[in-house]
Every structure is written in structure tokens, then in C-alpha cells.
Image: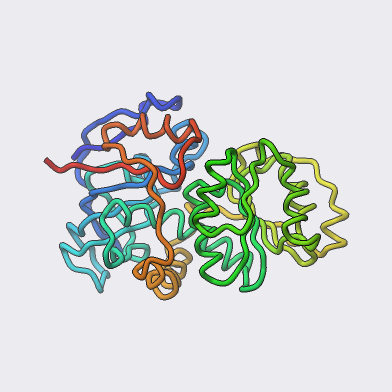
């Protein structure tokens, strides 16, 4: 089968087409004939040699796919060959066929094509786990999400609004701000031209936000703490400005804040399965009625994965960058 390999750690050009043997389904696994796969920031970090796959996972990049079930392993029920599915996988997505845990494989939402479906798993699992499970965002509260025009950000905005929260977001341009407002953000701040801490406090009438979803790290963490309301929760999921930071912890004590974070990829299938169950019950209906939709920015052929990575690194996208897989 055709795949995209990481020839060596480095820039996008190290992603090269190659041939591999077909994967085989073990107990609790299915094989998916892949028609589309998502491109995500962890793929870039893996390509750079800074995010190795967890033990037992494929070294092929790619954390989310959609397609048809081609084979089913033992101890799997509820699926049949030919079913249209999407799946969160620990690796192996940039390929014509991908092995997926049955526990993190879900039916394609009604009305979705494979590209839309492949844009779901990594972002929706991540947002649900961190914003709703870990940070326990509630209706009537306010979420601050950085990078609102990204795949993660665009999902966080829509889900938070769908469940009754208010949303403040930061972006790097006025065009991206308009994109986020169209998705439902109550306030979108261009961090290049405005002090986002001041604008957050203005937007919340001085109260601050209840939850911060942070993908930036570095000096943003102290600023986020300044933005948080009493009993606020700060969740870190990435560190574009680095993980090391010097903090004034006094506001954390005085406001009784919770600073937490997580990575999804290394977690076991039982943890991810619980997220899958919650998404199927609470979010699938919202996607099928059009309330919440993955935002697709650009689609590349699988063979042009290097160009897709370069496009993501340029940071001009709004929503998801996708790979489409031909089986001709």
C-alpha cells in the first residue's frame, strides 16, 4: 500500500511517498481503507523528531482517518466490512489503509463525506476531553481559546456555544477574527494589534473567564492567569512558545485557580473509548443537524503531504488541513 514516511527528522520535505505492507487487525482492532486523513500539529512535531509515537503505534504520521472498514479483528462487535467510519488512531493515518482501535472508531455522521468525517476525531476528542471533561466548562461560563481559527479552536468555539457558554478567542488577523465571530465567538481579539488581557477583561466586564484552553504556552500562561476569574481552570494542550515559564503563583492562590493539561495520544483505549461514547451521544446529533461542523480550509492529495505541512506551518489556514487518498 502507499504511505507517507518520515525519511529523517526535519522540514516538510522529509515526508516522502513509500510502499508498505498492509496492516493486519489484531484483537479489538479494525482495518480502515482510508479515503481521507487529517493534518495536525502533533504530526509536525513528530516529523521534527520531537514527538515519537507511543509504544506499538505505527511510525507513519497521522492521527485521524475516515474511510470504509476493510477487515475486522477478534473481539470486535458492532462493525461490518464496508461500514463508513472515522477513527482516532495513535499513528498510521497517512496511508491507504490504517489499523484503528475499534474503541475509537465511530460511524461517519449522516450527511458527511469522508473529508469532513476525517476532520473530526483528533480535534473533537481533544476539545471534549480538555474543555468539557477536564475543565468542566458549564453553560453560562466563559471560555477563552487561543488560536480560534485553528482546527482545535474552531471546534472549541462551536462546541462551547452549542452547550451554552460564551467564547472569547485570540487570532493573528482581522480576517481570522471575522471567521471566528461567524463560528459563534462572542469576542475575537487580534493579538497583533490589541492587548488580549485588557480586551478579555473588557469583554467580561472585569470578571474574567472561567476556562482557558491554551495551545501557546510561554509568556501566555501568566497572561492567561491574569484573565481567569476566581475558581477558573487553565488547560494546556500545546506549547507553541515553549513549555518553560516563570510564574507568579499568588493569583493562583488568591483566585483558587486550577492549572492542568493533558496529551491525548499516549492515553489508553479505555480512556479514549469513554470520550468516543460521549461524542457519539452528545455531539454526533449536533453535527448531523448542522449546529457544529468541522471547518475545512484546504485539501491536498496524500502524495503532497509535505506541501500540506508547509501550508500548516505558514499559519494562514482557517480550520482543518486535510489529505485525500486515491485508490486508483
| Residue 178 position within the rendered picture, expressed as x and y whole percent measured from the top left | 54, 48
Give the percent coordinates (x, y) of residue 98: 27, 49
Residue 256 picture quarter? bottom right
Residue located at (65% from left, 72% from top): 140
Of residues 39 and 24, the one nearer the viewer is 39
Q: Residue at x 32, y 65 (%)?
A: 106
Query: In the picture, which quadrant includes the N terminus?
Result: top left
Colour setting: rainbow
Quadrant of the drawing holding the C terminus: top left
Q: Residue at x 20, y 64 (%)?
A: 83
Q: Is residue 172 above or below residue 168?
A: above
Residue 253: x and y in percent read 85, 60
Left or right of 51? Residue 107 is left
- Above or below, 186 against 54 in this view is below
Relative image position of residue 263 (x, y in whole percent): 55, 52
Among the 4 quarters of the image, the one containing residue 112: bottom left
Q: Would residue 127 appear left or right of 311 to someone viewing this image? A: right
Image quadrant in which you'd find residue 142: bottom right
Amino acid at each position: 500500500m502507499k504511505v507517507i514516511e518520515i525519511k529523517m527528522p526535519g522540514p516538510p520535505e522529509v515526508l516522502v511517498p513509500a510502499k508498505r505492507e498492509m496492516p493486519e487487525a489484531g484483537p479489538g482492532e479494525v482495518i480502515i481503507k482510508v479515503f481521507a486523513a487529517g493534518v495536525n500539529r502533533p504530526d509536525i512535531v513528530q516529523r521534527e523528531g520531537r514527538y515519537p509515537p507511543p509504544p506499538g503505534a505505527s511510525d507513519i504520521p497521522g492521527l485521524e482517518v475516515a474511510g470504509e472498514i476493510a477487515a475486522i479483528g477478534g473481539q470486535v462487535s458492532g462493525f461490518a466490512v464496508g461500514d463508513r467510519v472515522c477513527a482516532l488512531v495513535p499513528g498510521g493515518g497517512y496511508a491507504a489503509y490504517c489499523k484503528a482501535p475499534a474503541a475509537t472508531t465511530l460511524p461517519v455522521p449522516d450527511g458527511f463525506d469522508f473529508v469532513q468525517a476525517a476532520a473530526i476525531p483528533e480535534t473533537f476528542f481533544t476539545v471534549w476531553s480538555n474543555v468539557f471533561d477536564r475543565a468542566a466548562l458549564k453553560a453560562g461560563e466563559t471560555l477563552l481559546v487561543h488560536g480560534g481559527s485553528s482546527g482545535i479552536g474552531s471546534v472549541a468555539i462551536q462546541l462551547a456555544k452549542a452547550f451554552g457558554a460564551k467564547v472569547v478567542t485570540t487570532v493573528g488577523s482581522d480576517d481570522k477574527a471575522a471567521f471566528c465571530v461567524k463560528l459563534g465567538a462572542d469576542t475575537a481579539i487580534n493579538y497583533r494589534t490589541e492587548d488580549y488581557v485588557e480586551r478579555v477583561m473588557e469583554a467580561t466586564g472585569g470578571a474574567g473567564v472561567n476556562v482557558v484552553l491554551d495551545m501557546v504556552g510561554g509568556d501566555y500562561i501568566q497572561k492567561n492567569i491574569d484573565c481567569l476569574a476566581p475558581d477558573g481552570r487553565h488547560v494546556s494542550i500545546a506549547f507553541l512558545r515553549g513549555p518553560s515559564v516563570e510564574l507568579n503563583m499568588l493569583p493562583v492562590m488568591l483566585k483558587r485557580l486550577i492549572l492542568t493539561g493533558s496529551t491525548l495520544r499516549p492515553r489508553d483505549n479505555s480512556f479514549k473509548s469513554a470520550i468516543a461514547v460521549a461524542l457519539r451521544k452528545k455531539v454526533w446529533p449536533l453535527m448531523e443537524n448542522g449546529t457544529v461542523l468541522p471547518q475545512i480550509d484546504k485539501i491536498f492529495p496524500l502524495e503532497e503531504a509535505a506541501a500540506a505541512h508547509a501550508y500548516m506551518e505558514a499559519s494562514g489556514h482557517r480550520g482543518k488541513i486535510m489529505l485525500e487518498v486515491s485508490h486508483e
